[in-house]
Amino acid sequence: MKQTRSRLTLALAGAAAVVSLAACAGSGGDSDSADADGSSGGRAAVAATRDAPEAGDLGTLSKQESAADADPAAGAPASPGQQDEATTPAVISTGTVSLEDKDVARTRLEVRKIVDRFRGSVSEQETVTGDKGEVASARLVLRVPAAQFDEVVTALEDVATLTDSSTSSEDVTGEVVDVEARIRAQRKSVERIETLLARAETIEQVVAVETQLARRQADLDALVSRQKWLADQTGMSTVSVYIQQPAQKDDDGDDDKGGFLGGLERGWDAFVDGLGGAALVLGFALPWLIVLALLGAPLAWALRRRAGRRPAGPTAPTDPTPPPTSPPAAATP
């Protein structure tokens, strides 16, 4: 019995020794592996430590850009003058003025004088001439200061006979402020991408960052162009001016008149037209008549003179004896 207990004790002790040796061997193996890979692991750790801010920046940038796309004003801090810009109204004003005048050229000149007086410009001009070479109609597109838009329209309406005038205004104050906020957010986004591009080391990183930079730069350029267009439209208003001669009297309407007055008017018109036609024929024939007169007068004079020089022919002899007379008839009882 005592021998059995001794053997069991020895077996347990041996097993404990084996477990201890295995644990020591495992620890030693791990230490050896760590020592063997110490240089490569250190380099990886250094690279991970160095690249950790870049990865963090990319993640933060993606979140910020997503928020900026959803709400551009959220990514841009409010500037001190932003509230002042919001209270300044931005309005796009356009107008159309139609005029009538027999002398279209004179009216066009007066319109240009008004433009010069208000320090505006003529961006477009179109002129149509009539059969006689006179200016029959004209179209001008004017660019005038927005602050004096109403004054310019009023001055244009008094140049000639006004046939139509219309104006319209669009308030774009909210859009102007929104574009300003988007531009500020987009510029900060481009600056962050440029910082990441300077810290990129591999080709994959450079290509990825440059792709993002190109897209954000294109968005920024589009916003800047929109901002310039809004500034131009709100700073200078557009007015289109149409000038034409009065409509001609309709001849067909005159033919519908009846009665004595209608016949008298048509007869007078026919008489005037006849006189005009006769004058036209006379004017056409008069030069020929003058030429014929100049050529025919010497010819007629020569013929008359030649006829005067021609000798007279012999005359028949006359009998002095009177012709016999018949006796008177006898009277019947």
Image (tube, helix red, strand yellow):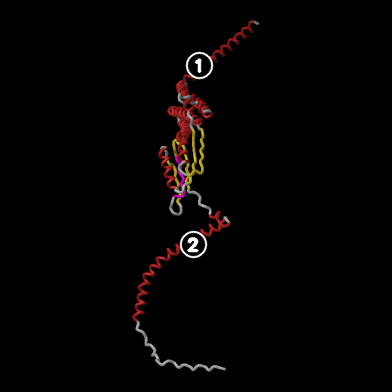
Looking at the rendered structure, which numbered label has been put on residue 28? Answer: 1
Decide: few, some or many residues near mark 1? Use Cα within 10 Å; few <14, some 14-19, many ≥20: few
Q: Does residue 15 sit above or below 134 in this rendering?
A: above
What amino acid is labelled 2 in the image?
Gly
Q: What range of the chain is rendered magenta?
A: 135-142
Residue 285 visible in the shown view = yes
Q: Does residue 316 sit above or below 109 in this rendering?
A: below
SS of the residue at dot 1? helix
User: In the rendered structure, does residue 167 fall within the stretch colored magenta?
Assistant: no
What amino acid is labelled 1 in the image?
Gly
Q: Does residue 320 sit above or below 221 in this rendering?
A: below
Pick whichever, 200 or 282, lies toward us. Answer: 282
Residue 232, percent across and down? 45, 35
The quarter of the image holding the C terminus is bottom right
Q: Give the dominant element type of the magenta stretch: helix, strand or loop.
A: strand
Residue 182 visible in the shown view = no
Residue drawn where x is 37% and y is 86% of the image? 313
Comes first in the chain, label 1 or label 2:
1
SS of the residue at dot 2? helix
Q: Which residue is mark 2?
A: 274
Residue 231, percent across and down? 45, 34
Q: Quadrant of residue 111?
A: top left
